[in-house]
């Protein structure tokens, strides 16, 4: 891959005060790799889909995979699928999306806050608000979704605060540390997102 190819359609950061969702840069990769793989059993993985074991990979393999993901086809109108979450200029996590079905533009979001010191501070909620708005603005979506599990109550609360609601609950289909948990499907429709924006829009117009 040509050096710097992923800069061809670099997108502007999404900013809310000290919180920034920005495109991944090549110089971020070593820090990201350390955040993900420095511990054999990282604390963040106990909450982020712990039923899927974390597969450790070499830095070279990680870098190659990320560079490929960061490369942007100039002919593709979709926004970059992964961004860094930065708080007070420190990398704290990543936020992403993937397309489940191209025909209906069924899209699922993903978010990981690697630094536990940031948990419970609203970073996840605010990031989901910023990211879901960006995706609705940039693509002809009718819905954004997110999948989690019933043991991750903090994630469920953050998603609800961001405007998503529980759409489906597959009971006792996940096993974590020997206990059964539910798989939780959450989502928000475009019209629900627009209704959520309406009060803010009205205030801005009146001001």
Image (tube, grey):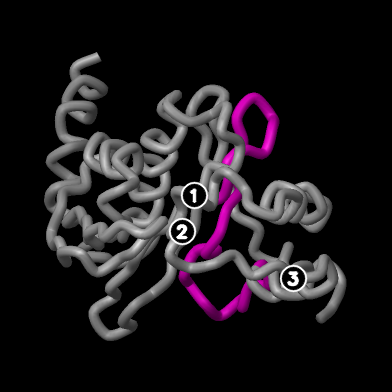
Q: Nearer the viewer, mark 2 or mark 3?
A: 2
| 178 and 134: which is toward the camera | 178
Q: Looking at the image, which residue sits at the far top? A: 207
Question: Residue at 69% across / 76% down in the picture?
Answer: 68
Q: Say if the magenta span includes residue 156.
A: no
Reading the image, the residue beneath label 3 is: 57
Residue 92 placement (x, y as % from top left): 61, 38
| Any part of residue 39 in sight | yes
- Range of magenta residues: 70-94
Question: Residue at 57% across / 36% down in the picture?
Answer: 20
Q: CA distance from mark 2 to mark 3?
A: 17 Å
* Relative vertical location of residue 172 with respect to residue 155 in this rendering, above or below: below
| Quadrant in the picture for the N terminus | bottom right
Left of 17 or right of it: where is 204?
left
| Any part of residue 5 in sight | no
Reading the image, the residue beneath label 1 is: 46
Residue 65 placement (x, y as % from top left): 70, 74
Asked whether disc 2 touches disc 1, contact meaning CB atoms under 8 Å apart, the reply is yes
Quick one: SS at disc 2? loop
* Relative vertical location of residue 65 with respect to residue 128 in this rendering, above or below: below
Question: Residue at 22% across / 59% down in the picture?
Answer: 182
Quick one: SS at disc 1? helix
Reading the image, the residue beneath label 2 is: 50
Residue 134 placement (x, y as % from top left): 40, 50
Q: Looking at the image, which residue sits at the far front? A: 178
């Amino acid at each position: 891959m040509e050096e710097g190819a992923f800069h061809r359609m670099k997108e502007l950061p999404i900013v809310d005060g000290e919180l920034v969702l920005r495109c991944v840069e090549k110089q971020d990769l070593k820090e990201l790799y350390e955040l993900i793989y420095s511990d054999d059993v990282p604390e963040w993985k106990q909450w982020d889909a712990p039923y899927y074991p974390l597969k450790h990979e070499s830095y070279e393999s990680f870098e190659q995979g990320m560079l490929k993901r960061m490369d942007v086809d100039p002919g593709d109108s979709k926004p970059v699928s992964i961004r860094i979450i930065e708080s007070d200029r420190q990398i704290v996590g990543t936020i992403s999306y993937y397309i489940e079905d191209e025909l209906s533009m069924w899209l699922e979001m993903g978010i990981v806050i690697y630094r536990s010191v940031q948990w419970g501070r609203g970073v996840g909620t605010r990031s989901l608000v910023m990211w879901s708005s960006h995706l609705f603005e940039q693509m002809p979506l009718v819905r954004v979704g997110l999948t989690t599990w019933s043991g991750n109550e903090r994630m469920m609360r953050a998603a609800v605060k961001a405007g998503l609601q529980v759409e489906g609950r597959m009971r006792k289909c996940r096993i974590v540390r020997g206990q059964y948990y539910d798989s939780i499907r959450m989502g928000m429709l475009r019209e629900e997102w627009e209704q959520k924006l309406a009060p803010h829009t009205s205030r801005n117009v009146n001001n």
